[in-house]
Image (spheres, rainbow, N blue to C red):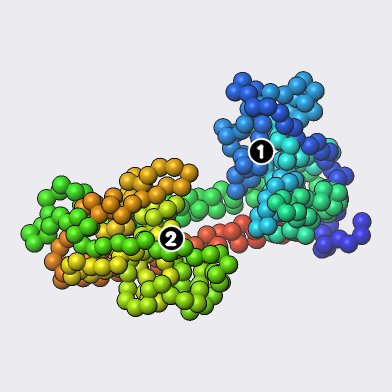
């Protein structure tokens, strides 16, 4: 075949994907709690496995069932879906027990030659996608991406002898198991970092009614500050960059040219949607009508301490439920927080900010580790299909 990607070891050969497997499109029908479980792209897991418990159950005819029923070793290809920033082309390896089918945005690939190991082909296609090569085989419409399937069937697959395929698969799975264990440890570390911060907040800001240290007191937020709702700003007036930041219910929305607040520092609280999201911001700035801000202080206090205390309050449980949850100023005014003397507030802020920096550093390290693990996974697969593993 022409346009071979690279030179293969002796005994290997290049074959087109369409030469070693056949394919069938998935099916669709009416939902039925007693129907056949049908796997969709939402059931694909990041490691190429499938979530069988989340499969939708559909009422399928005998004809549909005969056409689309899956066999262990089938490869499911995400042929349509995605979006502008989510390429299709993911694959998953079916090894379920019982009767399953795949959905209409999925194509089932089934090895058709005795000299091809299904698991070997799956790992090649998995690598083909995570290395970014399916990007060039996709067509983007307004809301959906489609894989140009004829071109996909023409991709070149490096095929070693069957015994070598088995050896490579065993080696890949040995190394991938180690990577999976490393990912599990990284996830546990991430969860511990989150628990560390939650625990620190719980120790600093006890629940209302708890006995407080000497000099501390329970105070309603309405005794500490007065709030004011932000003002509406049109989307057309928002810019991607500029000197005047615009804050909404959940943080920075964009930039504008005229400030709502011209001086000082304040706390912005999400009012609609992301109820209770807390941000400390500096003027000049604009606050949208989906948020409220502290317009007046009644007592001297550390603004960072108050913001930390607010972040420890579960405002979502106090919000008015609806299509767009919302919270009123009156509800916020009745919330109790523990208020220590001013110097103690400042000490607590220093302590918690130092802890935040440590947690931030830990998370950055975890992100770096995650990136390196992905790079290692890609490198292992790359070597495997070049005969270097």
The residue under the point 78% across, 55% down is 139
Tell me the residue that label 1 is attached to: 40
The residue under the point 81% across, 51% down is 148
Q: Is residue 306 visible?
A: yes
Q: Where's residue 207, x and y in %?
A: 21, 49
Q: Is residue 119 left or right of residue 301?
A: right
Which residue occupies the foreground of this view, 78 or 237? 237
Secondary element at image label 2 = loop
Q: Does 245 appear above or below 309?
A: below
Which residue occupies the foreground of this view, 314 or 265? 265
Secondary element at image label 1 = loop
Q: Where's residue 124, x and y in %?
A: 73, 51
Name the N-terminal-most of marks 2 and 1. 1
Tell me the residue that label 2 is attached to: 289
- The C terminus sits in image quarter: bottom right
Count up the numbered dots: 2
């Amino acid at each position: 075949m022409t346009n071979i990607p690279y030179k293969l070891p002796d005994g290997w050969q290049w074959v087109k994907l369409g030469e070693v497997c056949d394919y069938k499109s998935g099916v669709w029908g009416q939902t039925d709690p007693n129907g056949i479980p049908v796997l969709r792209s939402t059931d694909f897991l990041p490691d190429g496995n499938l979530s069988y418990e989340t499969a939708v159950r559909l009422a399928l005819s005998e004809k549909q069932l005969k056409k689309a029923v899956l066999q262990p070793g089938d490869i499911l290809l995400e042929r349509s879906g995605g979006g502008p920033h989510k390429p299709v082309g993911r694959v998953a390896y079916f090894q379920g027990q019982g009767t399953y089918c795949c959905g209409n945005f999925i194509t089932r690939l089934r090895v058709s030659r005795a000299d091809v190991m299904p698991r070997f082909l799956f790992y090649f296609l998995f690598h083909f996608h995570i290395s970014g090569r399916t990007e060039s085989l996709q067509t983007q419409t307004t809301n959906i991406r489609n894989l140009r399937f004829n071109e996909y069937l023409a991709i070149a697959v490096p095929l070693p002898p069957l015994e070598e395929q088995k050896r490579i698969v065993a080696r890949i799975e040995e190394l991938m198991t180690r990577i999976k264990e490393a990912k599990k440890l990284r996830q546990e570390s991430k969860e511990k970092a989150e628990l560390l911060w939650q625990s620190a907040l719980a120790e600093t800001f006890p629940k209302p009614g708890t006995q407080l240290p000497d000099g501390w007191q329970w105070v309603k937020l309405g005794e500490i500050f007065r709030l004011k709702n932000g003002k509406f700003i049109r989307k057309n007036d928002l810019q991607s960059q500029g000197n005047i930041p615009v804050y909404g219910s959940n943080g920075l929305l964009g930039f504008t040219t005229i400030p709502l607040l011209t001086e000082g520092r304040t706390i912005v609280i999400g009012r609609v949607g992301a109820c209770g999201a807390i941000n400390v911001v500096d003027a000049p700035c604009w606050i949208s009508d989906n948020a409220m801000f502290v317009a007046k202080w009644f007592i001297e206090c550390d603004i960072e301490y108050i913001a930390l205390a607010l972040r420890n309050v579960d405002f979502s449980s106090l919000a008015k439920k609806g299509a767009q949850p919302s919270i009123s100023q009156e509800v916020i005014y009745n919330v109790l927080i523990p208020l220590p003397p001013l110097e103690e507030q400042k000490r607590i802020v220093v302590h918690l900010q130092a802890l935040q920096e440590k947690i931030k550093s830990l998370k950055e390290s975890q992100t770096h580790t995650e990136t390196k693990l992905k790079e290692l996974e890609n490198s292992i697969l790359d070597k495997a299909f070049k005969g270097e593993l």
